[in-house]
Structure formats: C-alpha cells, structure tokens
Amino acid sequence: MLIVGGGFGGLYAARALGNDDRVEVTLVDRRNHHLFTPLLYQVATGALSPGDIAQPLRSILRKQQNTTVLLGEAVGLDAARREVRLADGGTLPYDSLIIAAGARFSYFGNDGWARDAPGLKSLDDALEIRRRILIAFEAAEREGEEARRAEWMTFVIVGGGPTGVELAGALGEIARDTLRRDFRSIDTSHTRILLVEAMDRVLPTYPKDRSRSAQRQLERLGAIVRTGTKVVALDDRSVTVELAGGAQERIPARTVLWAAGILVSAFVAEVARATGAPTDRSGRLLVEPDLTVPGHPEIFAIADAAVMPWKKDRPVPGVAQGGIQGGRHAARAIRARLDGQPVKPFSYSNRGDVAVIGRLAGVTDIPWLGPLGRQSGFAAWLLWLGIHLVYLIGFANRIVVIVRWAWSFLTHGRGSRLITGQPVLPPIEEPEPPTGAPPPSGPPPPTGRKASRSADTPGSSHAGRASTRHD
Ligand SMILES: Cc1cc2nc3c(=O)[nH]c(=O)nc-3n(C[C@H](O)[C@H](O)[C@H](O)COP(=O)(O)OP(=O)(O)OC[C@H]3O[C@@H](n4cnc5c(N)ncnc54)[C@H](O)[C@@H]3O)c2cc1C
C-alpha cells in the first residue's frame, strides 16, 4: 500500500492504517516533514519559526511498525504495472495507492509572475516571504526619495481567501504595532497594504456577513481591500489591476504576495494523464463517491488533489479537514476490502471555517455550533487558537507554540524577524539630482547613504534625523 504525500490527507491515511498488521504502508514525500499549513503565515510574518509548525514524517510515524517513510518525488504512474516512478529513476510498486500530493496556487497561466509574487505553500516560501517583507522595511528606511520609499512601503496581496486575509492582517499588525518603534527614518504605520480580490468580497466561501466583518477588521488594521479587482500584469516594481468597469490602474509596489487560484501538483496531472481520469479546471481529479479514480478501484485520490463529493453543487473545500477525513476514509475503505466488506461512499462532516485577522481578531463560520459559531473579533480568535492547537501535530510543538505566542502577546513582538538568504539588501538607488542643479562636489556618498531628507513625507516620521543617523 503506497501513499504519495505526507500532508493532511496522506498523514492521516497512514495513521489510520498504523495498527493494522495486514497492511504494509509506504509513505513517500518530496519533503521530509509534515507541515501545519494553517500557521504558515505566522512563519512568513516572523511570529513563529519553521520548526514550530513542521515535524519530520519519520518521527511522527516512528511507532508504526508497518509503516516505511521514504524521501522522494513521484513524477509518473504506470497504472497497468501498478508502479509509481520517482524523480531519481526509482519505482515504487503498489497494490493500493493513495494520491495525496496536494495543490498549489495558480498564476492563471502566468507562471512567470511567481518570481515577483511568491505564493505561500511551503516552509521555503514562508522564509522567502519573510525575507522580502523585512527587506522592504530595511530598504524603505534607507531610501531618501519619497516615491521610491512609498514603493517599498506598499505591499500588495493578491487573493482574498483565508490565506490572503490572514497575511494582510498579520502585515497590518506588523506595520502598526510590532515594527513601529524599530525604525527611525520611516513610520511603519504608514505602510500601504492592499488586498486585491477579483470577486466581489473577501472570504468568498464564507457567508456574506462574515466577509463584511473580515473586511471591516482588515480596514481597522489599516489594510485597503480592493474587491472586484483583477491582476492583469506585474513585475518587480508594480502590479497592474483591472477594475470592474474594465479600467486599468498601475500600483507601484516592491512586494507582491500571491494567494489566489488553485492548481494541482505536477504528479496529479500525470495521474490524470496515465489513467484518463477527468479533472476540473484546476486539474483536481474527479473521483467516484468512494474517492477512487474512475476505472481504478485500487487508486484513491484525496484532499486537495481531488474534487471530493459533498453537497449537490459544492465539493469539499480545500481545507485541512478535507484531507484528514479523506485520508481516514481511504484507510477505512482499504480495511473494508481486506475484510471482504463493501466500501461505503465518502461522507464529509463540515467542521467549519476560521480565519484570524491580526493579533486578537478573526471571523468564524462553524455551522454545528449554531449562532455561537458565527463569531468576530476576539471570540473568533480564541476559537481559532483552540482549534489550531488541538490539531497541531506533535505534543512538543503545542507547548512551544503556546509559549511563543504568550510571549509575543506580552511583548507585542515577533521574535523570528530574521533576514536569511540572499541577497540581503537590493541596491538602494541614489536620488536623481534636480534638473539644473550643480553637480555634486566631492566623492559620492557610499551606497545607501542619504545626504538628507527635505521634509516630512508619507512614511517618514523622523525626516530630519535621517542625515544625523547616517552620517
Ligand atoms: C498558507 C495556507 C494556509 C492554510 N490555512 C488553512 C487553515 O487555516 N485551515 C484549514 O483547514 N486549511 C488551511 N489550508 C488548506 C490546507 O492546508 C489544505 O487543504 C490541506 O493541506 C490539503 O491536504 P493535502 O494532503 O491534500 O495536501 P498538503 O497538506 O499540501 O500535502 C501534500 C504533500 O504532498 C507532497 N507532495 C506533493 N507533490 C509530491 C510529489 N510529486 N511526490 C512526493 N510528494 C509530493 C508535499 O510535499 C506535501 O507534503 C491552508 C493552506 C495554505 C497553503
């Protein structure tokens, strides 16, 4: 029995088969860890460290004697020979296969945008985003020219789903609270955070009143929410958006973060090709009611890799619970077959949605709690905290995360604000001399040194001090 992917779907399938010695489980993942994605934005914004939200798969599953964990990337499927091909040329045979390789954000055919607008999916993405956010503030601190400083202090987040909303909220909190006292030349509370969403509201899968509440809470944190607005072009200095009426606007911004669309991983596309399975627009496999691939009862596709049936006109949303329940269902189905029992159709139980906005706010939509399940603000945040800690894999992680959070609430800090990776700081451009001005005498100042700031400008809190500090 082979599982491809150790995310929510794959890990919970492996765990559910762990105490069954009739089954030999092999779990293969291209990363050596399980990632708790709901807290990934906290790493991207410096509140948590990577190790707080990830655990090696090998250590999570070490007590399961029937389970082998392998590091490897699945790249192909031979459905006739029942083999999965790995990137290193090896093959893994199976009698039953669970495909749980997940999905990533989609750039809607503009994959080149990924360079200038990274998405948040892996720990590497989170560290890259953290680097870009922190560098933007550093560069703004050294930038003397108003328009260029404004570019550094403008952040555009594309996609108003839960990830975009949580990122915008965390950025608002960083700018207005955490970093406020750390800089001298800029006032970080003047940071512009734009959340751009093509649909007419943020959190489009939540009820409308939750979307309105989320927008209000974001605006309280200083974020500007632009709904009905579609990105049509972007580069390393700007984003061009198209408004509902068709007009276009160029927004100068040095930091663009992508949290829109969904596209399955390349391996899932290979599975569709090899089995002839139908897919939706995002490439997710359209599965039978028991989550098997049509014509292949030995292959299950679950979680973000599949369109798992739920309501008549709505499949299971791309949330962790979809993975957890899909994984457990596939494990139950494999057991039922071993017992000679019929396999039941998959049935999804909606546990609800929670999105956190900034430090102590959020929105919830948890239908089974009745009116109590529709919270905003602090109550929503408390619910979110409880739910996420319960599901955080690994006891040690939970303790560490609680302690770190408690500390960051007490100190209003984000202790993991470290810039790592290269380049540390992009070249800071020197201001153009005004037309007709005499050429500067003497040697030019070293890169990044600003001779002076003329006056208080947006984003500049201590304009007069810039020269003192730098010189
Ligand atoms: C930033 C972010 C925040 C989120 N927040 C929430 C939230 O607050 N609440 C919530 O319910 N849901 C949240 N989600 C959604 C949730 O993470 C997903 O729905 C869930 O992880 C899907 O589970 P999965 O098993 O399909 O995929 P994943 O958990 O993504 O796991 C896929 C695994 O497959 C591996 N893999 C991929 N391709 C290959 C290959 N070719 N070979 C080998 N291994 C491969 C990957 O390394 C990964 O470990 C969030 C998602 C993101 C990105």
Image (spheres, rainbow, N blue to C red):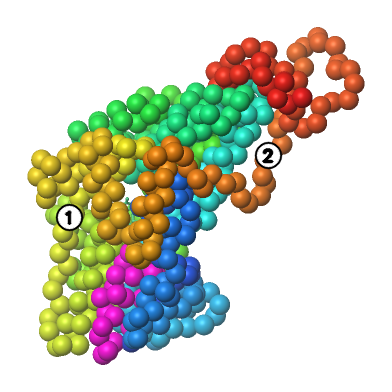
Residue 67: name its quadrant: bottom left
**Residue 114 seen in the figure:** no
Residue 291 is situated, as x and y percent measured from the top left of the image, at 23, 69
**Marks 2/1: CA–CA distance:** 46 Å
Counting residues from the start of the chain, the first of labels 2 and 1 encountered is 1
The region drawn magenta spans: 1-23
**Residue in the picture at 17% in, 82% down:** 336
Tell me the quadrant of the picture where the N terminus can be found: bottom left
Kind of element beneath mark 1: loop
Viewer can see residue 420: yes
In the rendered image, which quarter is residue 218 located in? top left
Query: Which residue matches tag 1?
Result: 350
Residue type at mark 1 is Asn
Compared with residue 261, is residue 79 higher up or lower down, i.e. above or below?
below
Q: Nearer the viewer, residue 306 or 255?
A: 255
Name the residue: 42% across, 34% down. Answer: 173
Return the residue nearer the eye: 332 or 459: 459
Q: In the rendering, which numbered label is found on residue 140?
A: none
> Would you name the residue on which mark 2 appears?
426
Seen as rendered, the residue at the extreme left is 370
Judge whether 372 appears above or below 441 on screen: below
Residue lying furthest top: 436
Can you tell which quarter of the image residue 215 is in? top left
Residues packed near mark 2 inside 10 Å, few (<14), some (14 to 19) or many (20 plus): few
Amino acid marked by disc 2: Pro
Element under label 2? loop
Residue at 70%, 32% (x, y): give it.
Answer: 428
Image quarter where the C terminus lies is top right
Q: Quadrant of ligand 1?
A: bottom left
Specify few, some or many for label 1: CA neighbours under 10 Å numbering under 14, 14-19, or 20 or more: some
